[in-house]
Amino acid sequence: MSRPSLALYGLTGSGKSTISALFAENLARRGLSVEVVKIARPLYRTQAHLYQVAGREIGTWEPDQELLCELARQFRRINPDFLVEDFLARADASTAQVVINDDLRDAATDYPRMAAAGFDFVRIACDDQVRLQRLAARPDRTQSPETDATWGYDQIIPTWTLDNSGDDPRSAQQQVDEIVTKWLAGPASDLHLLSDPTGDESS
């Protein structure tokens, strides 16, 4: 994958989707188009189909965590590479200048494939008590207990870590801005050229 790509990972309730939106907003203010591409899209589509067959309704991105985890296990049992290959194909087909993923959960297969494709990784850290309080306020159909070991997060080497334990959104915004600024200036990225509308490498 030639375009700059960022993957966010962290436990449920750590605020990945919220931080992902902050990254997208920050990059957009710098003149870059962004698309969030999710690994779990096939899981949510299958979840919706099962609910329909069972005569029940569920929102497009409304999580039934127990079901989603079981679906992921079964997809990986049948074809361990399916989810990451489907994701990478959709990410590669994106017309955006930057691709963001905010639902990396598999360190054994998905992480090395995404690293090989050029993704940088941001660990979303969060105090566990704060995370559990957030989860208690969410309307998820079901929730599954998890730790870093559940997903093998200890095997992932983050490019950056963002602490999302606080209640002040300005802290997260500042951390996102600092990460994006470093990312734009990084020698391994062409983002500094993409964000320059003149395309002048000498500027």
Image (tube, helix red, strand yellow):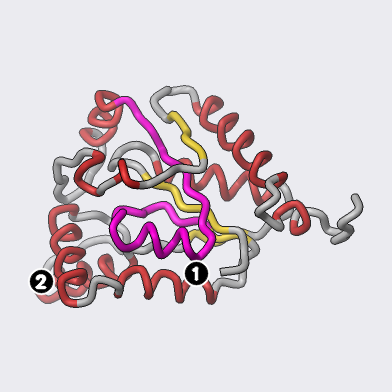
Q: Classify residue 144 by image quadrant.
A: top left
Q: CA distance from mark 1 to mark 2?
A: 33 Å
How packed mark 2 is, by other alpha carbons closer than 10 Å (few <14, some 14-19, many 20 or more), is: few
Q: Which residues are magenta?
A: 100-127
Q: Is residue 41 above or below residue 34?
A: below
Residue 128 placement (x, y as % from top left): 26, 27
Residue behind mark 1: 91
Secondary structure of the residue carrying numbered label 1: helix
Q: Is residue 66 magenta?
A: no
How packed mark 1 is, by other alpha carbons closer than 10 Å (few <14, some 14-19, many 20 or more), is: many
Judged from this view, the residue extending furthest toward the left is: 54
Q: In the image, what residue occupies the spot 72% across and 44% down?
A: 185
Total number of numbered discs in the rendering: 2
Residue behind mark 2: 55
Residue 183 placement (x, y as % from top left): 64, 45
Q: In the image, what residue occupies the spot 25% across and 34% down?
A: 137
